[in-house]
Structures are given as structure tokens and as C-alpha cells.
Image (spheres, grey):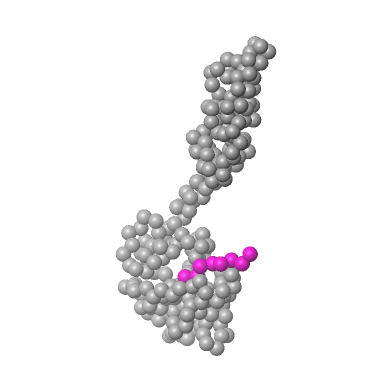
Amino acid sequence: MFSLKNFLHFCGKLQNQLTRDASAKATAMDQDEASTTVDNIVTQFNTYEDFLDSQITTLDLYYLEDEGLARQLVELGYRGTGEVVRREDFEARKAAIEIARLAERTQKKTLTSAGKDLHDNFLKALAVREEDNRSGKVSSVIFIRDRNSHGQEVSGYIDYAHRLKTEDFEVYFSGKKRLLPRPTDMSFYNWDSHIAVWNSTPNYQVIADNPEGLLFKYKRDRKILNVDPKAQPGDNSTRSPILTELYTQVVIFDHISRRKT
């Protein structure tokens, strides 16, 4: 049975402890330390109730004779052997860690280049860029010139991030097929039939009427990518020729997005 005498005795002990710890608790932890503390607690305990129980001593239960009351005192910061963590902070951080864990697992699953034994420089270059193109950190444009299955010479510019979203690159990284420009890509030219095609993508607007040559405008930050080998590629962009045994010519343009706010 809960007794008033035991509770008053407990309150007296509690008051003595609060007096001893007042100066220490008056100084708030900085944000980084608090975040680290919550992370450690969230990682250690499955539920908030498990954390509260870890702060309750046998002596607490002896005087209070009520586990629920003991938990409430810990949650309010009046009792406990460790840091005070609010329920909403615990549950929010628990959810955030779980979301991050699932996102990381999903990201690893979607990297079709993962675990592949790649020998050619071009496939290695695609593998290095796959994750950043999927996440949107980098947008790569691939120029390829080679012959198709009919022996015709073709060339064109490929929006790597868009292609990753619209088809399975397993066949390319495994060597079952070769990545080649298509009439549906940003640009396509058949040197035998003289067919030329331009298409804007979700990432780029094609500027085909520029007197000095083909330009691509990245839609997120509206920066211009200049693919003329004699010109600079543009702000936040690089041009990387790739030495490969699979194609006649390959150049990869990488643009780092600077989205306007």
C-alpha cells in the first residue's frame, strides 16, 4: 500500500538530492552534446518506458510503492540516475534514426553497380557517379560516339540521372549490353542517315538554336552546361574525357547542383 509517511520520507531525500545537483543542472548542455546524449539513449533502449525503468532504483520503488509514479518522476526530471530526456525527443529521434536506416538500406539496394567487378574505365566512371546522380547531388551528362548493332556510327548526349530512373542499369554494369545514345535522349545523331534529334529531359532544357553550338540548361539552378570541347563547361561543371576500350569516344560532364532558394 502507498503510505504518506514513506512518500514524505522520499520527498525529503529528493529535496536533498535536488539541492546537491542544482548547480550542475543549471548549466544546460549545448545542442551537440544534448543530441549525442539522446542518440546514445535511443540506441540503447527500444522504448521510452525501458529508458525510464533504467533510471528507477529499488529504493525508489520501496518508498513510492508505485512503478507508474516512479516513471512520471523520472520523466519530469525529479528523479533518475542519468540524463533527462523528454518523451517527444526520444520518440522523434527514434523515428529519425529508423528512417535513416531504411533510406540507407534502400539506397544500397538501388545501386546496381554495387558488388560488380568492373574493368573498363567507362563502367568504373559510371559506378563512381551512380549514387550521387540518384540522390541529385550531381547531374552527369554522358557523350558517347560509337557504332550501333547495325554498324552505323551514332553519337549523342545522355542524361545519366534520368536514364537511371527510367531503366535498369544492371544490363550495362554486368556487360550484357552497351550503353548507347537513343533518339529519346538529350541529343542523338546518326552519322549514316543524318538523323538529328533533341529532347529536353526532367533535368535539362536543350538549347539547340545557339549559333556557337549545343547548350543544356540545368533546370534546378538554371546554370548553362556548354559541351563545346573548346569552351569552358560552365559554372559548377567539369568535363572529363574517359579512355575506354568499349567506345570510340566518351566524355562525361558533371554538374554540381546549386539550387536557388
Left of 54 or right of it: where is 118? left
Residue in front for this viewpoint, 20 or 198: 20
Taking the spot 53% from the left edge, 31% from the top edge, the residue there is: 82
Q: What is the chief secondary structure element of the magenta stretch?
A: loop
- Quadrant location, the N terminus: top right
Q: Could you tell me if residue 112 is visible in this image?
A: yes
Magenta residue check for 122: no
**Residue 99 position (above or below residue 217):** above
Residue found at the far right of this picture: 4
Q: Could you tell me if residue 148 is visible in this image?
A: no
Residue in front for this viewpoint, 151 or 210: 210
Residue 66 on image: x %, y %: 62, 18
Taking the spot 52% from the left edge, 62% from the top edge, the residue there is: 136
Q: Which residues are magenta?
A: 254-261
Residue in front for this viewpoint, 184 or 1: 1
Taking the spot 51% from the left edge, 77% from the top edge, the residue there is: 234
Residue 228 on image: x %, y %: 47, 82
